[in-house]
Image (tube, grey):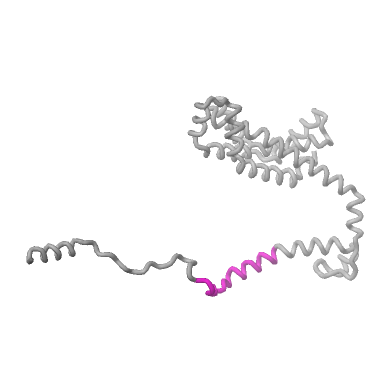
Amino acid sequence: MTIYTAARHRAAEARPRVSYVRPRPPRGVGTVGRRRPVNVAAGIAASFWLVIVAVPLYYIALTSLRTSDSYLTDGALRPPSGLTLENYRQVIDLGFDTFILNSTIVTAITMALVLVMALPASYAIVFGGTRAVRATFNTFLLGLAIPAQAVIIPIYLLITRLHLYDSLTAIILPTAAFSLPMAIVVLTSTLRDIPRDLFDAMTVDGAGTVEVFRRLVLPLSRPGLVSVGIFSGLNAWNGFIFPSC
């Protein structure tokens, strides 16, 4: 009996003690109905940012509805004594619809050219591995260091020699060329993030280069293509250098 009792005590001492401390609920659980403290600093910052954004919009809208005489007599920020749509009529008479159409055409074709040329070039750079491919990639990287303002005169002479002056092609080609380096850098990084095992698996299954590009590279590079498309579109729409050619 004594031996059995001593064995029970030793077993009880050796048994791990279980903690019955009630776990704390995760943050956000059980706080329904509680009011969060007001973030005064965030409200002040948001109000300040709203003023920064709203004042230019207010100034543009007000200026578009006033005459030149009202601008001089009433002041720049005060509401005009009389509103007019004469400014809008003059802009439309100057061919505003043609300008919008030209900008849309330039933006759409530039985005298409950049996407069509950048993705195959990035695919060759990532999976080429030859010295010529690496030299081509370095050439594209060099394009990032050359601003468009530094080569505006050679571009003007080239466009004149090609008889492309005063045409949309003279805007589309330089804009697409200056968007290609950034697009190739972004898409090259996107393709390098794709696991190499997927390419090996498709190659073992008998897929060729075109099949791998169409069924693997193109679907998995959609985020990079969207980013490149937005960047190229904004660059083409807001470009004010090459139209002066």
Task: Report the side of 92 relative to 225 (left or right).
Answer: right
Residue at horizontal 58%, vertical 72%?
40
The number of numbered discs placed on residues in the rendered structure image is 0
| Residue 80 figure quarter | bottom right
| Residue 189 figure quarter | top right
Q: Is residue 47 magenta?
A: yes
Task: Report the side of 57 relative to 71 (left or right).
Answer: left
At which x and y percent is residue 107?
A: 75, 42
Picture layout, residue 40 above or below residue 227: below
Picture layout, residue 95 above or below residue 83: above
Q: What residue occupies the far left of the structure in this picture? A: 2
Picture layout, residue 142 above or below residue 21: above
Picture layout, residue 204 above or below residue 238: above
Task: Report the side of 139 relative to 95 (left or right).
Answer: left
Residue at horizontal 62%, vertical 70%?
44
Q: Which residues are magenta?
A: 31-52
Q: Quadrant of the N terminus?
A: bottom left
At which x and y percent is residue 51?
A: 70, 66
Residue at horizontal 76%, vertical 45%?
240
Q: Quadrant of the C terminus?
A: top right
At which x and y percent is residue 121?
A: 62, 31
At which x and y percent is residue 194?
A: 52, 38
Residue at horizontal 40%, vertical 68%?
24
Task: Report the side of 185 relative to 172 (left or right).
Answer: left
Q: Is residue 110 magenta?
A: no
